[in-house]
């Protein structure tokens, strides 16, 4: 391992870009960065580990979502300053729920969970995933001053009570036709729902997949399902 790592030219920040490629389809899944510790952890465990530049910490791909990457081969380029990893991807590689992070292109529009246009266009799933990541951080590294940590320490009944309260407040806001309050209470309800997902070891991606299944159901199949429910 050490001989291999010595060949790699890390930049002045101690990082090297790592291109992740599906070993079956050869599709490029994502680009991330590794430092020496991340590379060692990847080689040792057989699962991809990276260095988060925003959170400044080591992280394993799929540590919260379960969408891990089993490494099949690690290569480096002619200048030894870029890594290429062939992996067996479990689930979606992208935190938006897309199979690959590279799902947008020139003259192409990203349709998945997006609204708006131009500079105002936002990946709604990306926002939810970022909030979920913060929630998971508070769950896994409890802090006395953290509201989320207090919810998890109180147990599922406390979380369910908050969801019930927020749902009730959303109903009242709607009855009052107060649009500002509707938005505010809907955000509270979504937030506490993410907390509940985390409690059960579920992720936003699990919900995205369910919505995608429903969205892709043909009219005939939908009628069949509705008939069974009746």
Image (tube, rainbow, N blue to C red):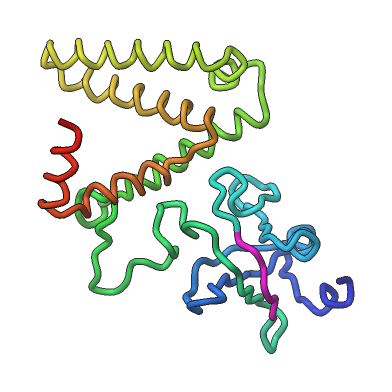
Residue drawn at 36 percent across, 22 percent down: 188
| 217 and 165: which is toward the camera | 217
Q: Is residue 151 above or below residue 72?
A: above
Left-right relation of 169 to 87: left
Residue 130 position, x and y percent, is 47, 41
Identify the residue at image location x=89%, y=71%: 2
Would you say the magenta stretch is mainly helix, strand or loop?
strand
Residue lying at the far bottom in this picture: please name it. 78
In terms of image quadrants, where is residue 1? Answer: bottom right
**Left or right: 225 in relation to 68:** left
Q: Is residue 193 left or right of residue 150?
A: left
Residue visible at 77% across and 66% down in the picture: 43
Q: Is residue 153 above or below residue 95?
A: above
Relative to 177, residue 28 above or below? below
User: Could you say where residue 128 lies in the image, as x and y percent from the top left?
Assistant: 40, 40
Q: Is residue 58 left or right of residue 148?
A: right
Q: Residue at x 49, y 60 (%)?
A: 93
Q: Nearer the viewer, residue 102 or 216?
A: 216
Q: Quick check: is 72 in the magenta stretch? A: yes
As rendered, which of 18 and 203 lies closer to the eye? 203
The magenta stretch is 69-75
Q: Quadrant of residue 78?
A: bottom right
- Residue 107 lies in magenta, yes or no? no
Quarter holding the C terminus is: top left
* Residue 19 falls in image quadrant: bottom right
* Total number of numbered discs in the rendering: 0
* Residue 179 picture location, percent across and down: 16, 22
Residue farthest along the right direction in this orientation: 2
- Most foreground residue, 33 or 192: 192
The percent coordinates of residue 142 (x first, y second) are 66, 24
């Amino acid at each position: 391992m050490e001989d291999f790592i010595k060949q790699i030219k890390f930049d002045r920040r101690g990082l090297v870009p790592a291109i992740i490629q599906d070993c079956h389809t050869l599709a490029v899944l994502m680009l991330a960065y590794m430092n020496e510790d991340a590379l060692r952890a990847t080689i040792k465990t057989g699962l991809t580990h990276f260095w988060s530049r925003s959170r400044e910490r080591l992280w394993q791909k799929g540590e919260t979502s379960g969408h891990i990457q089993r490494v099949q081969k690690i290569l480096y380029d002619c200048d030894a300053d870029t890594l290429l990893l062939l992996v067996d991807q479990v689930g979606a590689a992208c935190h938006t729920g897309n199979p690959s992070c590279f799902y947008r292109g020139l003259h192409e529009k990203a349709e998945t969970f997006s609204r708006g246009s131009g500079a105002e266009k936002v990946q709604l799933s990306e926002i939810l995933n970022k909030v979920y990541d913060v929630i998971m951080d508070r769950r896994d590294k409890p802090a006395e001053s953290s509201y989320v940590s207090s919810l998890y320490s109180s147990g599922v009944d406390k979380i369910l009570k908050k969801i019930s309260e927020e749902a009730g407040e959303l109903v009242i806001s709607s009855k009052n036709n107060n649009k500002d309050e509707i938005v505010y209470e809907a955000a509270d309800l979504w937030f506490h729902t993410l907390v509940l997902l985390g409690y059960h070891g579920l992720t936003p991606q699990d919900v995205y997949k369910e919505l995608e299944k429903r969205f892709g159901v043909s009219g005939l199949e939908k009628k069949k399902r509705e008939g069974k429910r009746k």
